[in-house]
């Protein structure tokens, strides 16, 4: 599928999307060097033997809005809404640092790395919520916390060993990453974990060709 550097998409003409509904979400990627540091750290944590389903390296991103099942006919309007929001913003830099878990390290379900800036990611996510609500996508009722999911906890088996490693890295700095585009992803659930495929990309205004 073609990506829209000017926020325009050939979705209407594409035959690469099946007629059935597909799971989609809107996200921003992180710099490759940051990704590699997180991957190396996750691989080290995996040596603990804790019962965690680790995210694939290509799946390390910052989710802005989970859309759920989407029909092909809905995609052009979704992409237009994303373009209207992202295209009005200039690129900025985020800092990836710290470790935490949802809902807490004592009752972990999701292990994640934090994303820090002066509020731009949260502002972008809020604007997307507002833009997508008229298209039938309900607003998220939980507070938005910018983060990169590293793994999902299946059970607490082996958590004690992993927790010690985590506590030694709670304030780790993973690096900086420039935010210059927003991506609509497809998510396919597989027995080995979710597989993410970029469907459409729009660049922030200073990066349009």
Image: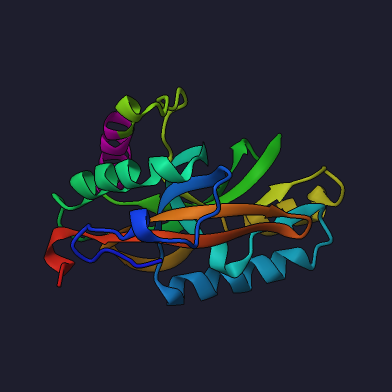
Where residue 181 sits, quadrant-wise, is bottom left
- Residue 128 highlighted magenta (yes or no): yes
Secondary structure mostly taken by the magenta-highlighted segment of the chain:
helix
Residue in view at x 85 percent, y 52 percent: 158
On the image, the x and y values in percent for residue 120 come to 25, 46
- Residue visible at 14% across and 60% down? 205
Residue in the image at 21% along x and 44% along y = 85
Q: Residue 81 placed where, x, y %?
A: 26, 42
> Compared to 180, does 137 lie above or below?
above
Indicate the quadrant containing the C terminus: top left, top right, bottom left or bottom right: bottom left
Is 110 on the left-hand or right-hand side of 97?
A: right
- Asked if residue 149 shows in the view, the reply is no
Q: How many marks?
A: 0
**Span colored in magenta:** 118-131
Q: In which quarter of the image is the N terminus?
A: bottom left
Taking depth in this image into account, of 135 and 206 the one nearest to the observer is: 135
Q: Determine whether, in the image, residue 80 is placed left or right of residue 51.
A: left
Image: 126 above or below 150: above
Question: Nearest the camera: 129 or 188?
Answer: 188
Residue 34, horizontal then vertical, whole percent:
45, 71
Residue at 39% in and 46% down: 75
Q: Does the image show residue 116?
A: yes
Q: In which quarter of the image is residue 58?
A: bottom right
In the displayed structure, 140 sits above or below 177; it is above
Residue 26 magenta-highlighted: no
Q: Which of 166 and 103 is in front in this view?
A: 103
Q: Pinpoint residue 104: horizontal percent, then vertical percent.
A: 62, 36
């Amino acid at each position: 599928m073609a990506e829209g550097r000017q926020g325009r998409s050939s979705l209407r003409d594409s035959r690469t999307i099946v007629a059935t509904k597909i799971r989609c979400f809107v996200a921003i990627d992180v710099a490759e060097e940051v990704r590699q540091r997180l991957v190396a750290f996750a691989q080290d944590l995996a040596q603990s033997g804790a019962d965690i389903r680790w995210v694939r390296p290509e799946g390390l991103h910052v989710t802005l809005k989970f859309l759920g099942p989407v029909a092909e006919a809905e995609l052009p309007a979704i992409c237009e809404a994303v373009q209207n929001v992202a295209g009005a913003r200039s690129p900025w830099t985020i800092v990836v640092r710290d470790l935490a878990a949802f809902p807490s390290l004592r009752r972990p379900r999701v292990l994640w790395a934090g994303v820090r800036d002066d509020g731009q990611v949260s502002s972008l996510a809020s604007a997307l919520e507002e833009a997508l609500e008229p298209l039938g996508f309900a607003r998220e009722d939980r507070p938005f916390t910018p983060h990169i999911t590293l793994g999902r906890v299946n059970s607490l088996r082996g958590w004690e060993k992993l927790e010690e490693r985590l506590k030694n890295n709670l304030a780790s700095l993973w690096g900086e990453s420039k935010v210059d585009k927003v991506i609509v992803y497809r998510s396919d659930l597989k027995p080995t974990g979710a597989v993410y495929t970029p469907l459409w990309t729009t660049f922030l205004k200073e990066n349009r060709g």
